[in-house]
Structure formats: structure tokens, C-alpha cells
Image: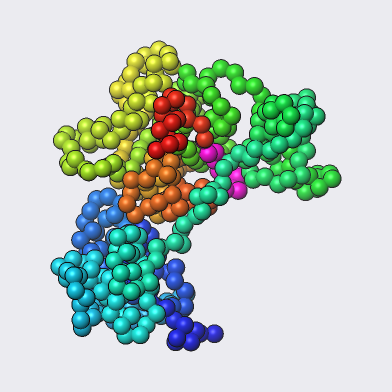
Amino acid sequence: MSQPASDIKSFVLDTNVLIHYPEAIMSFRDNEIVIPLEVLEELDKLKTYPDQRGKSAREAIRFLDTIAKKGNLHEGIKLENGSVLRVSYRLPSEVPEGIALERNDNKIILCAYALQRDGRRVFFVSKDINARVKATALGLRAVDYEKQKVDIATLYQGLREIDTTADTLARLEGTGELAWKERLLPNEFALLRDRVSGRELLARWAPIPAAEANGGETGRLIALPPWEGHVAGIAPLNARQRVALELLLDDRVRLVTLVGKAGTGKTLIAIAAGLKRVLEDKSYSRMLVTRPIVPVGKDIGYLPGEKGAKMAAWMEPLFDNLEQILSVYKRPNLKNVEQLVKDRILEIEALTYIRGRSLPNQYMIIDEAQNLTPHEIKTLVSRAGENTKVVLTGDPYQIDNMYLDANSNGLSYLVESFKGQRLYGHVTLHKSERSELAELAASLL
């Protein structure tokens, strides 16, 4: 049953919405989607960019072209989801004072303003906070594109802290496993704590077939043995780091996310585990490490040299972690990071050049993943070939991409989307182990 005309909403999309998610048009059911002509002009300019923005612009243009073949975009084309898509080049007959028409951003907002003046129920959709503020100042309803948003406050942790008794801990420690009625998720861990003594024990939840269940239990908690030794010279300093290493060294878990504030050891642990799996265990042919190139503060512009030289400046945080590991990880013929690269044990690659590749038998680490959109995350993770493990690390509260926040970035979206999958594992790291000063800075600033 179709909606009454008075209930139909007109969603005017800003360019950044289509860059964030090229198929965002399909997210608005049974309403009207309006693309201002200036959005098409901006997509046309962006399509030549070699980065992810260019790729998203090209995808959005191709998507619009496919729809355009089904009718007239000026009059409106009915979509499969019940919405009507059209392109508009409307401007109001009277432009509000102070709005400069030289800027495409203002023309896009004015298109929405003109439609509202016609009596439509208009919603201006943009990832740009300032554009939303300007639209609100003109009396428009301005909203963020929230289809791929999650609630960071309730984000999956990967580890449950459970208060229990000394008897329960003793049974788990004595037998190595414990029947458990509460259902946890695949590859989820539990930190059982005696309420009286404060003693703790780590365990991993394992489901059991319904036919084998007795007394309503859904699975078993398998106790983790005391940690011994090190991984590439690195040992866990707390329970959550221990969980991270369990997931990173488990080949059954093909995708791992590590979330935590600065200094919690996300990148260090991921790289150490990768070196062990490549150098010692020979489980993967090489370790591929990358991170998004998003400047903090004002960009310093183009960097000289070939790709390797350009990447070096952006990859210094990764090199710092590698140098720290190599200072305690002694292996024959392994002297420095340059040796790892020369022997093709380690590959440092720009995200731009990973797109389109197929990456089999590799240990792939994507650092600072909170600066990626959900669409970019999908593009990267889908590069994984046979026997490739993908590890993403990041801090959703430390985002440098102006169009993303803790709730809308690709890392948070992936954590919420993949939880419960048997190939996926996650843990949120809480305690900074870098230094007392780093812990204070992360907590107080």
C-alpha cells in the first residue's frame, strides 16, 4: 500500500553521503530521493582521484547511470524499494542573505531549501557537520546518514567479566572446562572473578550441540592455561592482551579486530603475532601491513621520492613497533626492518594499491582502521584470498577523518556486523601499558 502524498519525505543527499556509501540511495524506502545537480558536478571532479574518494565517486556515477537507463531522472524514476529518485537543479527565487552562490555546498543546501519552500517535507542528508548546521540555520531538517551507524557505548567487547564463586573457579581450574548455561558468542571469552578474593581465571566459550546439552547448558567454558614464553619477544601484560594473542594465533579465526585507546598494545601485539606466524610457524608467506593516509592537523602536502619513500613518513608508527619488537626478538639474519622488507617477509603497502588485488596466504594488518568508512572496510577485507588472515586495529575515539565519528566509522561497524560469526574474533583493550604518562593522557585528555 502506497503512502499518502503528505507522508512522503524528500531526502536531499549531499555529495559526501555517496562518497561514504555509493549505494546510499537504496537506503530510503517509499520516499523521494533528490540528487542536486551540483552533487553530480562534484562527483565528476572526484572521479579522477586515485584514492578511495575517486573509487567511491566512480561507483556512485555508475550506479546512477544504471538507474538513469530506466527512465527520466528529471521527472523521477521508481526504484525497486518503492522510492523515487530524481535529479534537481532548483534554486530558490530569493536567495537568503549571506549565502554565497559561488560555493557548490551552498547550492546543494539551497536546492533542499527551494524544495521545502514548495511545500515538501524535506530532509537534508549530509556527513558534513558544518553543512548540517547551515541547513538548520535556514530552517531545514538536517540529518546525518545513519544506516551504517552503531552505538559505541554498547559495542561488542569480545570478553565478558563475570562474578562467580571460589568453588566455580576451583572446578574450572581442576577439570579445565565447565558446563555453562548462559549463551556467549563464538570466539567470545569470559574473565571469571571470585567476588571475595578477587582471584581471576580466563576461559573461552565453546558451543555444544543441542543433543548433547544437559540441564539447559548451551556450551562450555574452556580454561586458558597459564601463559608461558613469548610471541616474537612480546608477552601479554593483562588478560585482554592474552585474549588478543589467543585470537591472533588461532588460524580458525580468519578476521580479528583489536579496539582500544592509545598505548593498549593493539598494533604491537598484532605485528608480533604476525612475525611469529610468518617466520617461525611458516603459516603465511608474508606479513602485509597498511594504514589509511589521513593527516592529523594540516596536511604538509606532497612528499618527494618513489612510493616507498612517500609511505615511510606515514608508516613511522608501524616502524616504531617493529623496531621495538626486533630489539628483543633475536633471530639469525634478521637485523632490522629493512631486512624484513628486502627478504619479502614484510610488505608495507598503501591502501590505494591494495584495492583490486587478491591476497592469498598472507597475514594482513590494517592499522588505524577507525579512519575508514564501512564501504572502505568492505573493499579491503574482501581482498583476502585463500589462507589469509586479516587483523584490524584502531581507536574509535581517535578519528582524523572529518566525516566519521565513533559510531559511524568502518571499524565499529565491522565489529557490530561480524559478532557471532565463527571466523571472527574481537577484543576491546582497556589498560594502557605504554607508560604511566600515556595512560594519564589517554584517560584525562
Q: Which residues are magenta?
A: 418-429
Q: Nearer the viewer, residue 207 or 27?
A: 27
| Coloring basis for residues | rainbow
What residue sits 57% from the left and 42% below the top?
A: 157
- Residue 123 in sight in this render: yes
Pinpoint residue 99: horizontal percent, then vertical percent.
20, 70
What residue sits 15% from the left and 68% below the top?
A: 102
Q: Quadrant of residue 186?
A: top right
Q: Quadrant of the C terminus?
A: top left
Q: Quadrant of residue 325?
A: top left
What residue sits 64% from the left and 22% below the top?
A: 226
Is residue 258 depicted above or below 343 in this figure? below
Horizontal side, residue 404 vs residue 247: left or right:
left
- Residue 36 in sight in this render: no
Q: Residue furthest right?
A: 215
Q: Is residue 422 magenta?
A: yes
Pinpoint residue 235: horizontal percent, then vertical percent.
52, 21
Horizontal side, residue 148 vs residue 352: left or right:
right
Is residue 174 depicted above or below 254 in this figure? above
Q: Is residue 200 magenta?
A: no
What residue sits 33% from the left and 22% below the top?
A: 337
Q: Quadrant of the N terminus?
A: bottom right
Pinpoint residue 175: horizontal percent, then vertical percent.
78, 27
Horizontal side, residue 297 vs residue 283: left or right:
left
Q: How many labels sit on residues?
A: 0
Q: Nearer the viewer, residue 286 or 407?
A: 407
Pinpoint residue 61: horizontal percent, then vertical percent.
29, 66
Q: Quadrant of residue 291?
A: top left
Is residue 239 depicted above or below 413 in this figure? above
